[in-house]
Image (cartoon, grey):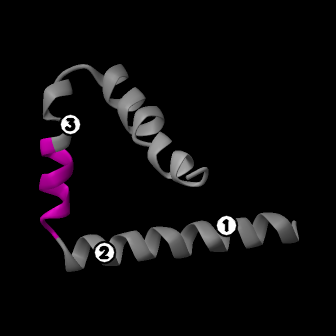
């Protein structure tokens, strides 16, 4: 139970920080729309791009 509470608290803090970032920089939503505009209508491709392709950049930087 303790581990679940710590996880949930961390998750809520992260979401709050993301909310603050979007409140401070409202144009970030438009940047995301622009970056995904070429995948318009193809939900599977959007999920693949965001979760896999975009996720490879931070992981690959760990090995450089």
Q: Earlier in the sequence, mark 2 or mark 3?
A: 2
* Extreme residue toward the front, this view: 64
User: Residue shown at 36%/31% (left/top)?
Assistant: 49
As drawn, 11 above or below 35: below
Q: Which residue is mark 1?
A: 8
Decide if residue 37 is on the left or right side of residue 53: left
As drawn, 1 above or below 42: below
Badge 3 local density, few (<14 within 10 Å), some, or many (20+)? Answer: some
Q: Which mark is residue 36?
A: 3
Q: CA distance from mark 1 to mark 2?
A: 20 Å
Decide if residue 4 is on the left or right side of residue 25: right
User: Residue shown at 15%/53% (left/top)?
Assistant: 31
**Which type of secondary structure does the marked residue at label 1 adopt?**
helix
Screen quadrant of the N terminus: bottom right
Residue 45, percent from left and from top = 33, 22
Residue 18, percent from left and from top = 39, 69
Badge 1 local density, few (<14 within 10 Å), some, or many (20+)? Answer: few
Could you say which is closer to the camera, residue 21 or residue 16?
A: 21
Q: Which residues are magenta?
A: 26-34
Q: Is residue 18 magenta?
A: no
Q: Earlier in the sequence, mark 1 or mark 3?
A: 1
All told, the count of numbered labels is: 3
Viewer-side label of 1, 3: 3
User: Residue shown at 20%/36% (left/top)?
Assistant: 36
Specify the quadrant of the image occupied by residue 40: top left
Residue 42, percent from left and from top = 25, 19
Q: Main secondary structure of the magenta part?
A: helix
Viewer-side label of 1, 2: 2
Q: Which residue is mark 2?
A: 21
Q: CA distance from mark 1 to mark 3?
A: 29 Å
Could you say which is closer to the camera, residue 27 or residue 10?
A: 27
As drawn, 7 above or below 32: below
């Amino acid at each position: 139970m303790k581990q679940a509470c710590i996880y949930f608290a961390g998750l809520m803090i992260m979401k709050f920080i993301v909310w603050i970032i979007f409140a401070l920089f409202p144009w970030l939503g438009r940047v995301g729309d622009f970056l995904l505009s070429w995948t318009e209508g193809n939900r599977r491709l959007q999920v693949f791009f965001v979760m896999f392709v975009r996720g490879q950049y931070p992981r690959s930087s760990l090995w450089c």
